[in-house]
Image (cartoon, grey):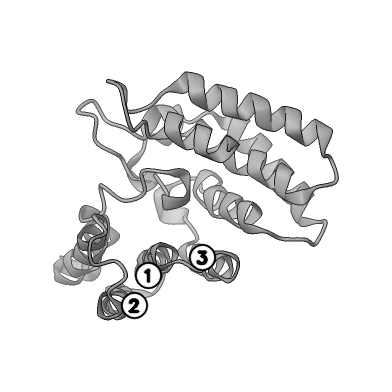
Amino acid sequence: MLYLLFNEGYAATSGADRVRADLCAEAIRLARVLARLMPDEPEVLGLLALLLPHDARRATRVDAAGDSVSPEDQDRTAWNRAEAEEGAALLETTLRRGRPGPYQIQAAIAACHTTASTAADTDWADIAGLYGELERFVPSAVIRLNRAFAVGMAEGPEAGLALVAGLEREGELADYHLLPATRAGPAARRRAPGGGRRGLRAGTGARGTTPSGGS
């Protein structure tokens, strides 16, 4: 329920505002309360560790036109570093308990973005591996699509496109609105001189309108 509340604030489904800071703040407040009440539950702490780094980037995830901005293209100087660092510290604490779960893994993916000094420093290989781990807990074609994007960033567009093609053959994502964008990103990178990552990002401006998706 708290995750859904935060998602509604992070990517509002109704109203004039794409982002609702009040809902994000309330979700984090309640997550802190829950963490105090259940200090020995790793996934409770993992949830808070997930929400904080995403909230740290909240002010930069939508541009002036109201379009989503990928983490690679966000202004990192405007991120809330205190929240990002708190989230990373909480993640380290909960992972030491040796009882991983989906919230902790998603928090680790978020931390890969917020702890990277620049977009070029993002550890996409680590992110791809984490999505693989996440799928063990939450089997999902959308998670496999996110992993395909990460693999394309880490290993090159051909590797990412091969995974996307496999998902297309399965047909589960035939109506998923982000599939064409994810497919177009590696294709653009393949055509770009030098195969730069800018081309890969070009097709993914709409990716991940919720925390688990990345923006």
Q: Residue at x 23, y 55 (%)?
A: 177
Amino acid carrying mark 1 in the image? Ala
Q: Are marks 1 and 2 in contact (CB under 8 Å)?
A: yes
Q: Quadrant of the N terminus?
A: top right
Image quadrant of residue 199? bottom left
Residue 163: mark = 2
Kindly identify the amino acid type of the residue bearing the numbered disc 3: Tyr
Query: Relative to residue 169, is residue 209 drawn left or right?
Result: right
User: Which residue is labeled 3 in the image?
Assistant: 131
Q: Where residue 24 appears, x then y in whole percent?
A: 51, 27
Residue displayed at 31% across by 79% down: 170
The mark that comes first in sequence, 1 or 2, is 1
Task: Identify residue type, mark 2.
Answer: Leu
Number of callouts? 3
Residue, disc 1: 148
Q: Residue at x 50, y 60 (%)?
A: 123
| Rendered residue at 19%/28% (across/down) | 65
In percent of width and height, residue 14 lies at 31, 27
Q: Earlier in the sequence, mark 2 or mark 3?
A: 3
Query: Marks 2 and 3, how far apart in space?
Result: 13 Å
Per the image, label 1 sits on a secondary structure element best described as helix
